[in-house]
């Protein structure tokens, strides 16, 4: 599959209008443009790669079914995100928690490859961070995933969640405070050992 | 601590404050020990979260993504059409059956009543089995395990 360059609002609007006229092929470029973002968000929510693909694909199917009711003058992703969030919620309601940790280390430089002991410690840390994120409220987890793991700016988060930018800052700060509180024992230990 | 500056800690760390807000925050930092401590704690946590990322999917998975989604969209349309057609056929058949059996038929009343009871009982059994299977499927902890 060819990687798509960012799409302008006019191109996106044209595709949405084609979808509304019943052309499923016009939905392909929209899926290809947003599938990575959608699957990454679902991964942060479900914690399982297989389920993330499944849930995000289900969200696209539902979006296509509902696209006739969408306002083509509005951007696609914020509208789609609400559907994706609902699919993730439904998933959490019916699925059992799996023991997977969907986080990995940002690749270290070849010059400072970690020792096996450090690797084990990193694994524990990843598991602790994921467990802390998983136990946050949906609202906290959502905004943390968007910012910390999908690297969206505050303006982008505001657009996706349909809230003012100032609310993004306060909501994100409160979510981080709760995450910090949950991670406090581990962060304190790391400070004490200087790692 | 001043709640206004407290909430700006995240904005400061993320580079999301405008120049005036940033300058005011840095002025406050010079005199406010609690704010400085809170900033350092938050920075420490951010260093931890930034040292990790969400797992990546393989290129093969992205290559298949649209075709799987398209197939699901198509299948969904197929199911809708199938359900509508089956619903119409079932309703028409049921109407014909009721008309034949209870209106135009000359069979004795006890026979009509017996057939009606057999149909009703069968219907209840089918619905009950479907409902039980569905309930068991919903609560099966292994249903997502791939064989």
Image: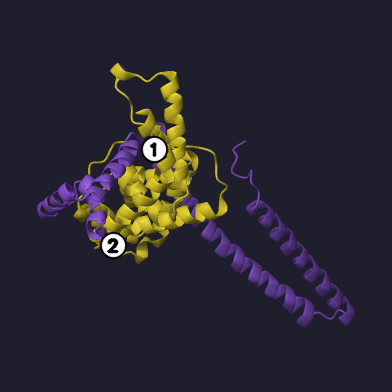
Chosen colour scheme: by chain
Taking the spot 34% from the left edge, 49% from the top edge, the residue there is A176
Chain depicted in yellow: A
Taking the spot 31% from the left edge, 19% from the top edge, the residue there is A112
Image location of residue A137, percent across then percent down? 44, 55
Locate residue B2: give its quadrant.
bottom left
Asked whether, in this view, residue A9 is left or right of residue B134, the answer is left
> As displayed, is residue B55 above or below residue B9?
above
Image location of residue B20, percent across then percent down? 10, 54
Q: Quadrant of the C terminus of chain B?
A: top right
Q: Chain of mark 1?
A: A
Chain depicted in purple: B
Front-most of A112 and A161?
A112
Mark nearest the camera among 2 and 1 is: 1
How far is the residue under mark 2 from the one under mark 1? 34 Å
Determine which residue is flagged by label 2. A163
Q: How many marks?
A: 2
Determine which residue is flagged by label 1. A188
> As displayed, is residue A15 above or below residue B65?
below
Image location of residue B1, percent across then percent down? 26, 56
């Amino acid at each position: 599959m060819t990687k798509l360059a960012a799409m302008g609002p006019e191109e996106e609007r044209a595709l949405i209008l084609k979808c509304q006229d019943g052309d499923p092929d016009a939905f392909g470029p929209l899926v290809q443009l947003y599938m990575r973002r959608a699957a990454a968000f679902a991964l942060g929510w479900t914690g399982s790669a297989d389920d993330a693909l499944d849930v995000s694909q289900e969200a696209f199917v539902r979006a296509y079914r509902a696209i006739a009711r969408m306002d083509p003058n509005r951007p696609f992703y914020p509208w789609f995100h609400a559907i994706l969030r609902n699919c993730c919620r439904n998933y959490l309601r019916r699925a059992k928690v799996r023991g997977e940790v969907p986080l990995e280390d940002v690749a270290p430089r070849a010059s400072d490859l970690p020792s096996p002991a450090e690797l084990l410690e990193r694994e524990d840390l990843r598991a602790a961070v994921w467990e802390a994120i998983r136990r946050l409220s949906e609202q906290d987890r959502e905004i943390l995933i968007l910012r910390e793991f999908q690297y969206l700016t505050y303006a982008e988060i505001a657009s996706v969640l349909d809230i003012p930018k100032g609310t993004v800052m306060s909501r994100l700060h409160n979510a981080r405070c709760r995450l910090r509180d949950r991670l406090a024992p581990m962060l304190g230990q790391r400070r004490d050992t200087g790692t | 601590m001043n709640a206004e500056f407290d909430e700006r800690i995240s904005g400061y760390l993320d580079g999301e404050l405008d120049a005036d807000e940033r300058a005011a925050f840095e002025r406050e930092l010079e005199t406010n020990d609690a704010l400085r401590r809170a900033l350092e704690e938050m920075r420490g946590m951010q260093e931890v979260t930034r040292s990790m990322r969400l797992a990546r999917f393989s290129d093969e998975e992205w290559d298949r993504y649209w075709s799987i989604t398209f197939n699901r969209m198509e299948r969904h349309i197929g199911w809708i059409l199938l359900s509508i057609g089956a619903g119409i056929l079932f309703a028409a058949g049921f109407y014909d059956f009721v008309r034949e059996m209870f209106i135009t038929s000359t069979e004795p009343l006890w026979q009509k009543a017996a057939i009606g009871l057999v149909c009703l009982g069968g219907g209840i059994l089918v619905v009950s089995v479907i409902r039980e299977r569905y309930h068991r499927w919903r609560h099966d902890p292994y249903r997502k395990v791939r064989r």
